[in-house]
Image (spheres, rainbow, N blue to C red):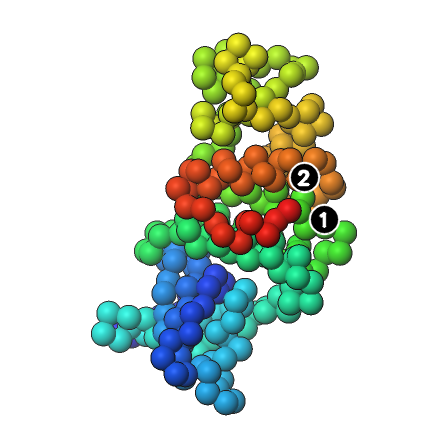
């Protein structure tokens, strides 16, 4: 099979044998791509810079025995500043772990790719971005991108319109806000300020967000998204 070029972001790597690594790459056209970076751990290997977490660039691959093998990569960014801030590094790792859990081989993932790329740029180069608030906004936009935007205007149980002035409660299992009559002890209270923030995030591209109950909303949205993925993301235990 002829070599193919894909633009992608390294979501994960695992050391393999003595000198190799297995890479998981997110591509907008091909979704999740697993590739062998052969010999990248040898001294002075030209593939080593392309075989690290968060690397973004154009990867050249060819198929060998039903496996993709990396031959070269033109780097666009390594998001090096993340490695200088442990908390931002943890937030970025959580973002990539979500994408790894959701992306499927051979399935287009343009929206997910663009969202992750934007999130990595903001975490790396925007000092004004609060990391926890940014990753909370990422969770909400990620849910929307994956097709499970929370119900915001009508009760997730009885479908009646929700009052404009609240109070609001969020039901993770039902997938959105619910009215007082349908609310249970398992639901999450959400203030008007938080509700307005969520609406604004869903209407606009991911950007540097101001703090706004991030800790509460992060835990709520983390449970919501991970329940839809049916996959617990271990790195989330280190947040907030």
Give the percent coordinates (x, y) of residue 2: 29, 74
Residue 139, numbered label: none
Q: Residue at x 26, y 75 (%)?
A: 64
> Mark 1 or mark 2, which is nearer the start of the sequence?
1
Residue furthest left as drawn: 65
Is residue 93 at least partly visible in the picture?
yes
Judge by depth and name the residue closer to the eye, 132 or 161.
Answer: 132
Q: Examine the image and state in which quarter residue 69 appears.
A: bottom left
**Callout 2 touching callout 1 (CB < 8 Å):** yes
Residue 214, numbered label: 2
Is residue 154 at least partly visible in the picture?
no
Q: What element carries label 2?
A: helix
| Cα gap from disc 2 to disc 1, whole angstroms | 9 Å
Q: Residue at x 55, y 49 (%)?
A: 236
71 relative position to 90: left or right: left
According to the picture, the residue beneath numbered tag 1 turns out to be: 130
110 relative position to 169: left or right: left
Give the percent coordinates (x, y) of residue 138: 58, 45
Q: Examine the image and state in which quarter residue 227 appears.
A: top left
């Amino acid at each position: 099979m002829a070599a193919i070029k894909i633009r992608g972001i390294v979501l994960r790597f695992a050391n393999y044998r003595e000198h190799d690594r297995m890479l998981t790459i997110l591509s907008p056209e091909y979704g999740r791509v697993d590739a062998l970076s052969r010999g990248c751990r040898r001294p002075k290997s030209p593939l080593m810079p392309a075989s690290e977490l968060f690397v973004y660039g154009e990867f050249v691959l060819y198929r060998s025995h039903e496996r993709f093998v990396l031959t070269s990569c033109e780097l666009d960014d390594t998001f090096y500043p993340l490695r200088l801030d442990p908390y931002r590094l943890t937030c970025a790792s959580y973002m990539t772990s979500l994408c790894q859990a959701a992306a499927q081989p051979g399935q287009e993932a343009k929206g997910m790719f663009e969202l992750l790329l934007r999130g990595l740029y903001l975490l790396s180069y925007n000092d004004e971005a609060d990391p926890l608030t940014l990753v909370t906004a990422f969770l909400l936009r990620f849910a929307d991108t994956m097709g499970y935007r929370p119900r915001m205007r009508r009760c997730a149980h009885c479908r009646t319109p929700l009052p404009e002035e609240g109070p609001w409660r969020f039901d993770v299992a039902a997938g959105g806000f619910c009215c007082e009559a349908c609310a249970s002890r398992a639901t999450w209270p959400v203030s008007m300020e938080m509700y307005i923030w969520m609406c604004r995030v869903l209407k606009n591209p991911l950007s540097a967000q101001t703090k706004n109950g991030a800790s509460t909303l992060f835990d709520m949205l983390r449970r919501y998204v991970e329940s839809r993925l049916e996959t617990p993301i271990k790195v989330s235990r280190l947040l907030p």
